[in-house]
Image: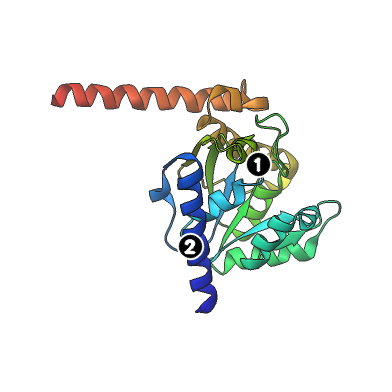
């Protein structure tokens, strides 16, 4: 009970700080399931991305899978240890961490993972690693994609008493098809590209990076344009 109280207090503190220090726009949080295991995935731009996600991910059973190299960062280490984060050695096949992550998901927990595996140095998407698709298949859970903008360079602006504009958008649950055992590597890449294109579709063009010209992204953007047109037409007819 004490740990749940601590998590909620921490979320409240982070929310207050973001509202005070930034111009933040949050959307789609109604898409976050109230129960059941899933992987929460977003692009990664800054050290303040994890507390941003944590602040609006209202699940008392949410934690994250994070590279052990970040244990050198005092803030990261404190935050992840306080929410029972799962540290993984990305320099080798860390089966112990993966087993722990899989068990956590199978028991109904929420696991945050940045599919790019690291922060983008350009602010735009880099190629996604296949780990999220692999773990989603093993644990048989969906993925909730989301997109962040404006956190890159936000910390220096805050220190200069400026309020950077940040957006945080949560998408819809993504149920990836089971991996084909005959060509597992190709299936992993296809599922990973689907996830990354879902994230890219929520981002402005300058953030889409290596997925800017991906055919699947173009399909998703075209589909969204059709939905918006149909919605506008319905409003016009009702008016």
| Label 1 packing within 10 angstroms: few (<14), some (14-19), many (20+) | many
Residue found at the far right of this picture:
92
- Check disc 1 and report the residue beneath it: 46
Residue 91 vs 79, above or below: the answer is: above
| Label 2 packing within 10 angstroms: few (<14), some (14-19), many (20+) | some
Residue 41 is left or right of residue 186, and the answer is left
Residue 56 visible in image: no
Q: Position of residue 141 (x, y in %)?
A: 55, 56
Q: Position of residue 193 (x, y in %)?
A: 63, 35
Residue in the foreground of this view, choosing between 158 and 50 = 158
Report the residue at 52% width, 42% height from top: 146
Report the residue at 63% width, 67% height from top: 82
Residue 132 visible in image: yes
Front position among marks 2 and 1:
1
Q: Position of residue 113 (x, y in %)?
A: 64, 51
- Check disc 2 and report the residue beneath it: 59
Q: Secondary structure at mark 2?
A: loop
Residue 41 vs 85, above or below: the answer is: above
Q: Position of residue 171 (x, y in %)?
A: 47, 42
């Amino acid at each position: 009970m004490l740990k749940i109280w601590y998590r909620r207090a921490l979320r409240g503190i982070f929310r207050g700080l973001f509202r005070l220090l930034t111009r933040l726009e949050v959307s789609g949080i109604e898409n976050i399931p109230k129960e059941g295991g899933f992987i929460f995935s977003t692009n990664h731009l800054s050290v303040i991305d994890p507390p941003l996600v944590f602040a609006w991910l209202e699940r008392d059973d949410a934690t994250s899978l994070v590279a052990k190299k970040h244990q050198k960062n005092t803030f990261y280490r404190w935050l992840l240890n306080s929410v029972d984060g799962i540290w993984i050695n990305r320099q080798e096949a860390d089966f112990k961490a993966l087993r722990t992550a899989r068990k956590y998901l199978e028991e109904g927990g929420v696991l945050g993972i940045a599919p790019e595996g690291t922060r983008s140095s350009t602010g735009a998407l880099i190629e996604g690693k296949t780990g999220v698709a692999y773990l989603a298949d093993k644990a048989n859970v969906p993925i909730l994609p989301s997109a962040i903008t404006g956190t890159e360079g936000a910390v220096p602006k805050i220190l200069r008493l400026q309020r950077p504009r940040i957006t945080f958008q949560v998408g819809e649950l993504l149920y990836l098809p089971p991996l084909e055992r005959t060509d597992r590597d190709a299936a992993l890449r296809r599922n990973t590209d689907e996830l990354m294109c879902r994230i890219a579709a929520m981002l402005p063009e300058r953030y889409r990076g290596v997925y800017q010209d991906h055919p699947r992204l173009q399909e998703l953007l075209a589909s969204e344009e059709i939905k918006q047109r149909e919605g506008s037409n319905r409003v016009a007819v009702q008016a």
